[in-house]
Amino acid sequence: MPLTCRGRVRGLEPSRGDVDDALGKFSLTLIDTLDTLALLNKTAEFEKAVRRVVTDVRLDNDIVVSVFETNIRVLGGLLGGHSMAVMLKESGRMLWYQDELLHMAKDLGLRLLPAFNTSSGLPYPRVNLRFGVRGPETRTGTETDTCTACAGTIILEFAALSRFTGDPTFEAHARRALDFLWEKRQRNSNLVGTTINIHSGEWVRRDSGVGAGIDSYYEYLLKAYILLGDDQFLQRFNTHYASIMKYISQPPLLLDVHIHKPLLPARTWMDSLLAFFPGLQVLKGDIRPAIETHEMLYQVTKKHNFLPEAFTTDFRVHWAQHPLRPEFAESTYFLYKATRDPYYLEVGRTILENLNRFARVPCGFAAMKDVRTGSHEDRMDSFFLAEMFKYLFLLFAEEEDLPFNVEDYIFTTEAHLLPLSLSTASNSQAGEELDDSNFEWTCPNTRLLFPDPAFPRNLREPIRSAVDKSCPHPTTHRAVAAEDGMRFMQEMMELSSQQQKEQLPPRAVQIISPPFFGRVVLTAGPAQFGMDLSKSSSGVRGFVTIAEPYNGCSVLSNGEIVAGRIALLQRGQCMFAEKARHIQKAGAIGGIVIDDNEGSSSDTAPLFQMAGDGRNTDDVTLPLLFLFHKEGNILLEALKEYREVEVLLSDKARDRGEMLSETEYEKMRKTTLLLLLQNLSTNLKSLFRNRQQTTPAWDQSLFSQRRDLAVTSPWP
């Protein structure tokens, strides 16, 4: 949790729904990033991390977890860590290692196996790590549906576990699930749906694409062929791929269709998870459409700094979140490996700079709650450290920078490293006789395909132009498209129904004083009166002061302190316009109203707009913004701890370079360095003082902070 600087422990934090199914009280971040440490040549840190996992992590927990997430993150992390430990042991390091991570991986695999106890062989989506499924103590086993990717993204980890241990049980279960999905494909279109009934095999959602719900099913068919050498997987992938290119691919777009009527689009938007597909096309050897789709994704990224969670066919925001997903960086790396075009190094630099400018916070990198405003979410998923850093490092690294040859490994969907030598292990299965008439056995040579070095650039140019024309920069007269399930609303007061003004986009409250320096951005609701921040190039900048009285419903008693500052007010007891007039009369340059409804948050509530009082509000000239209780508390806690807190009120978060003078920027650099060193020193002291501590929350928080400090700098 990068904003509050602590680990997220399931049950101790408010539930986030299905997202929390990845948390099993098994130090997720630590396990998921083991092989990242090895790849970054942090050998000593890797060895310490392995010892911590072996010593402190326990899997016998009475907790319900996602089979899919636990497989790719935890089982994959243990197997990737084992692969790296074996490699280091063979080179004379970690001689103490006796396959401890592999033993833990087998223990976890056995705990996941009860989920496969269905008539179809498709796994239940959830399993209790201690009690399995089916039983009152399991609190699971009643589900009937699962996503195609959830059931079809098992084979790499389970096959690797079987071949490492010599126990064929795991691979057999994963193959059975894949066989069932293949049999249930729509025979005319050769496409699969998004969700399926795990008992009957009926498709519950019949839309088909390459994004969320299906994505890694296709990925694992091709990678299973590469890792295991089974031609059957390649045949299935090629069959699906031909249908994808026939029905779903509309270069540069990838649009979902109905499996029974594949010529009919199922939606008019795309989700960000499809950003992995150009990378998969590179592995397939189909470079041209990979270049085209990747360029479209890059242009959308440049418009919004990050790839929105979903965007429309005219490249506008559909879902505004961005949880720091690595798929676009993954495809960038594979395209650079295939083409050696330095253009993709520039793309990687853009990704890296945007992460540092907009996502970096004192305790790591925070997910973007809204790419339009730059506001943050208190979330840094383990896949960010497991995947993003790997792909960015590999993109820029020379061969001599790498501690081993990555060509000897294949990346799982979570970017864990499994050795290709596993294909020689004796667990291959003889399948049906294959029709190889449509096989593509070799990948095309890009130098022969594209003898003209300008050819990739010529492919990208029309796509760049199309995105520019379809996605103009926002104007003050156009409302921002609402997130799915989120609608802009007006203040629920007796007079609000009389005011039918245009709905306004969210605003931003950005904390710019030390030690924040603009890294903390709070999503704020606008007022339908007062200064329009979208018309101000610089916003309003000032120190915050709590108004007295706090509700701002009468003349302020601390007017001399509020003058020249931004006043903090509590919602309630009078109209918003009245509060604005009182602080304006006292000389305030702006105001922030904090919700009095305890627990309210912009994470769960629609955007709130403050209405006027039914009278002419032209006399109100200062900006007034609204923060829900959770976001308001972040600001109040900062004020309590640092006393002097400066903020920027604006229409969207600003780059720190735009806000700070050269002197301020240098001060920021030095202050941040000092804080980082102090933080690291404190953590190291705590590490040695609490060596016997086994609380997963402490493990995750400490490891996240130490890795954040080690990997990248918060300034250019």
Image (cartoon, helix red, strand yellow):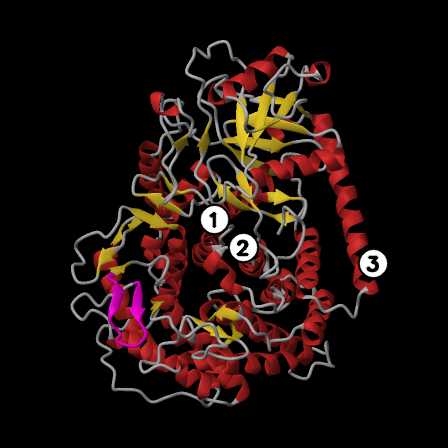
Question: From the viewer's perspective, is the residue at label 3 or at label 1 nearer?
Answer: 3
| Residue 298 on image: x %, y % | 42, 44
Give the labeled residue for mark 3.
685
- Amino acid type, label 1: Tyr
Whether residues under marks 3 and 1 lie with C-beta atoms below 8 angstroms apart, the answer is: no
345 over 120 or under it: above or below: above
Q: Is residue 61 magenta?
A: no
Q: Secondary structure at mark 1?
A: helix
Judged left or right of residue 310, residue 206 is: left
Q: Residue at point 47% right, 48% down?
A: 344
For the residues marked 3 and 2, what is the alpha-carbon distance in whole angstroms? 35 Å
Element type at marker 2? helix
**Separation of residues labelled 1 and 2 (CA atoms):** 9 Å
Does the magenta portion include 202?
yes
Across and down, in percent, residue 637 comes to: 69, 38
The residue that label 1 is drawn on is 344
Q: Are marks 1 and 2 in contact (CB under 8 Å)?
A: yes
Count residues near mark 2 (Cα–Cα under 10 Å), then give few for <14, some for 14-19, many for 20+.
many
Inspect the image, locate mark 3, and give the three-letter code of the amino acid beneath it.
Lys
Report the residue at 32% width, 83% height from top.
119
Q: Earlier in the sequence, mark 3 or mark 2?
A: 2
Asked if 553 appears above or below 343 in the picture, the reply is: above
- From what the image shows, is residue 145 above or below residue 483? below
Q: Which residues are magenta?
A: 194-206
Q: Tell me, yes or no, whether the two marked residues, 3 and 2, touch with CB atoms within 8 Å.
A: no
- Residue under pointer 2: 395
- Quadrant placement of the C terminus: top right
Q: Is residue 643 left or right of residue 144?
A: right
Crowding around mark 1 (Cα neighbors within 10 Å: few <14, some 14 to 19, many 20+) is many
